[in-house]
Amino acid sequence: MRLRALLLVTLWPAFASIGFGWGFEAHQTVTRIAFASLPEDFPAFARSAAASERVVYLANIPDRWRNVDPWLKQSGGSWSDHFLDIEHLAQAGLDAKKVPSLRYNFILIYAAGHVANSEKFPSIDPKKNADHTQEWPGFAPWAIAENFAKLRSAFSYLKAFREVGGTPEEIANAEADAIYAMGVLSHYIGDCSQPLHTTHHHNGWIGENPNGYTVWPGFHSWIDSGFLGKAGVKAEDLLPRATKVQALTLTPQKDGRDPFFVVAMDYILEQHTQVEPLYKLEKAGQLGNGQNSIGPEARTLMESQLLKGGQMLARAWLTAWHSAPVDTYLRTQLGKRREAAGAEPAAKKQ
């Protein structure tokens, strides 16, 4: 363990160049906390040992997507999907509490606001922007809401196959789809439990710095991986603190925004409140970087963030299961198939 911690301390530049987001073990920890937080009415197939390990593995996959080609960083596996620089919304004249829940509607108004307030934004070095992501504030709440919707869809057609005569192969494939969607959603919710994924101060303080916070370019990487390694934070130590969650109440919004998007944005804004406390802890020497030891307040904060991520993830999974809409088209087609095969319609069974 001491050797592992030493390696994490001495090799932080390598972690910085890889750009993990939350480190591999942090994403695993968030996902395991989520499973520990699920009530018994969550489907058993997804809580099996094999399924949960599959989800834990998948929670790291979106970080792998963006290590391939620049165009993939900007599209479905976008680096920008992993964060939201809250400050950039205000600089573009937008209110985080009112931005559209549809991604491309947001892109249009953000681009207009960026142009109209261009003097408020730093210049972009083209040599450091090969993937053309620096123009954008990040799309984390949209990624969370969109992947939540994919999970609802997967649960929707799984229920149809189960209830209206799907074959064992169809049901198994639908269950595999749901497992995959759970894992991908885990990544983005987990990312945003790390406060530095919610701010333009994501890798050292930028701009005016009257409090003298660190401008160290390895700060983000240290929080993602180095801190947890040196502190010895383990999932098994946090699981007993996980409490059973309830499904979210998705309240229709008067302005027409998707209610789960509103939940996702509120979650990110809550984590954003921990950005400056994190910098204060670094300034006080509590984060263990350099020759400092891990301070108790720092451990408490980071463990709390992992628990918040896991609990939010469990709520999202559970809500997707309970709120999955009826797939009327698939149910109709399955009913026709049953009747064509001479089976008694499901509605007539006692």
Image (spheres, rainbow, N blue to C red):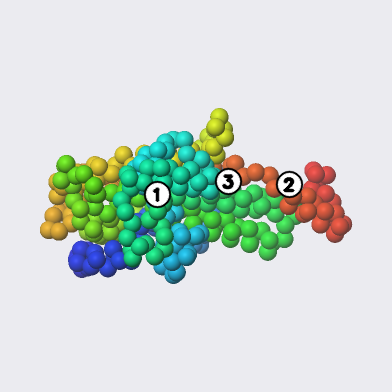
Report whether 343 appears left or right of 151: right
- Amino acid beneath label 1: Pro
Mark 3 or mark 1, earlier in chain: 1
Mark 1 falls on what kind of element? loop
How much space separates mark 2 and mark 3, taking CA atoms?
A: 17 Å
x, y (%) of residue 96? 42, 38
- Using the image as rendered, state which of residue 224 and residue 100 is in the foreground: 100
Residue at the limit of the structure toward the left, as seen here: 291
How much space separates mark 3 and mark 1, taking CA atoms?
A: 31 Å
Mark 2 or mark 1, earlier in chain: 1
Q: Are marks 3 and 1 in contact (CB under 8 Å)?
A: no
Q: Are marks 2 and 1 in contact (CB under 8 Å)?
A: no
- Using the image as rendered, state which of residue 187 and residue 46 is in the foreground: 187
Q: Please name the residue that numbered disc 3 is placed on.
A: 321
Q: Please name the residue that numbered disc 2 is placed on.
A: 328
- As displayed, is residue 99 above or below residue 235? above
Q: Please name the residue that numbered disc 1 is placed on.
A: 137
How much space separates mark 2 and mark 1, taking CA atoms?
A: 38 Å
Indicate which label's residue lies in the foreground, 2 or 1. Answer: 1
Residue at the limit of the structure toward the top, as seen here: 254
x, y (%) of residue 83? 39, 51
- Amino acid beneath label 3: Trp
Report whether 50 appears left or right of 285: right
